[in-house]
Image (cartoon, coloured by chain):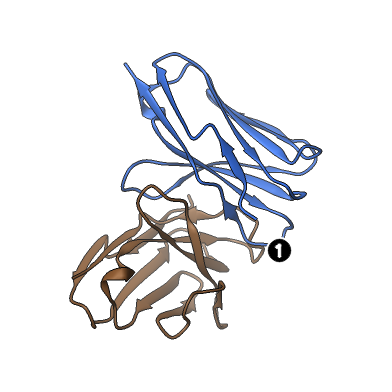
Amino acid sequence: GAVVSQHPSWVICKSGTSVKIECRSLDFQATTMFWYRQFPKQSLMLMATSNEGSKATYEQGVEKDKFLINHASLTLSTLTVTSAHPEDSSFYICSAARDARPADTQYFGPGTRLTVL
Amino acid sequence: QQPVQSPQAVILREGEDAVINCSSSKALYSVHWYRQKHGEAPVFLMILLKGGEQKGHEKISASFNEKKQQSSLYLTASQLSYSGTYFCGTAETSGSRLTFGEGTQLTVNP
């Protein structure tokens, strides 16, 4: 168990457009979902934490209006990159946890590679 | 605060052993270990909680020394499939988020 899916796997878009990425927990209910960003050969950088039914908590330096997060249900969270620019190109990974405590086990999705032209 | 992993990279031959360390300057509640292959998402390996846990699965095991705020991941009789980047994630309390180290790149050659 503990399978997390992401859609799409990759996306190429033009500068200025918005891109939505979905994260789903397939076989468990995720009280908490996390969104990470990873640049090549670098570590995972947490962008935001979202709990079902409440506003996401963003890490320092992450623009709330640019990276919109919606955690509509216990199995679905979405990340929308608004007005994407080339510097937003990255590997975006979500993870999900059964419990509300962030330190509990997180199960990662397969990631979405975003390329902004 | 980001934990420090060592070594940064290690190259092994199939069947050899390796140890990856993860250290923090702060007291930890838990340490999480993940393996990530190129272009893929991290895969959960194990979690160790404060109290001096040791865990293992097949030929991969880990220990957590909370006095030293250090965890070590042990890979014995390495297989080609062990290649990848290993990340440790640490949490200072049960309510705090995970902070990941820079990763250790492990390459296992035939």
Q: Residue at x 55, y 83 (%)?
A: A55
Given the image, what chain letter belongs to the residue carrying mark 1? B
Q: Quadrant of residue B94?
A: bottom right
Residue B32, percent across and down?
A: 60, 45
Q: Quadrant of the N terminus of chain B?
A: bottom right
- Picture layout, residue A82 above or below residue B61: below
Q: Is residue A101 left or right of residue A30?
A: right
For the image, the number of numbered tags is 1
Chain B visual colour: blue
Q: Amino acid at mark 1?
A: Gly
Residue A30, percent across and down?
A: 53, 65
Q: Is residue B28 left or right of residue A74?
A: right
Q: Residue at x 56, y 68 (%)?
A: A32
Residue A103, percent across and down?
A: 65, 57
Instruction: Quickly name the residue at label 1.
Output: B95
- Picture layout, residue B29 above or below residue A68: above
Q: Residue at x 38, y 23 (%)?
A: B108
- Secondary structure beneath label 1: loop
- Picture layout, residue A21 above or below residue B88: below
Front residue of this view, candidates A17 and A34: A17
Q: Quadrant of the C terminus of chain B?
A: top left
Q: Is residue A60 left or right of residue A63?
A: right
Residue A105, percent across and down?
A: 59, 52
Q: Is residue B65 left or right of residue B78?
A: right
Q: Residue at x 80, y 40 (%)?
A: B51
Chain A visual colour: brown
Q: Quadrant of residue B84?
A: top left
Front residue of this view, candidates A72 and A68: A68
Number of residues whose C-alpha sits closer than 10 Å to that of mark 1, classed few (under 14), some (14–19) or many (20 or more): few
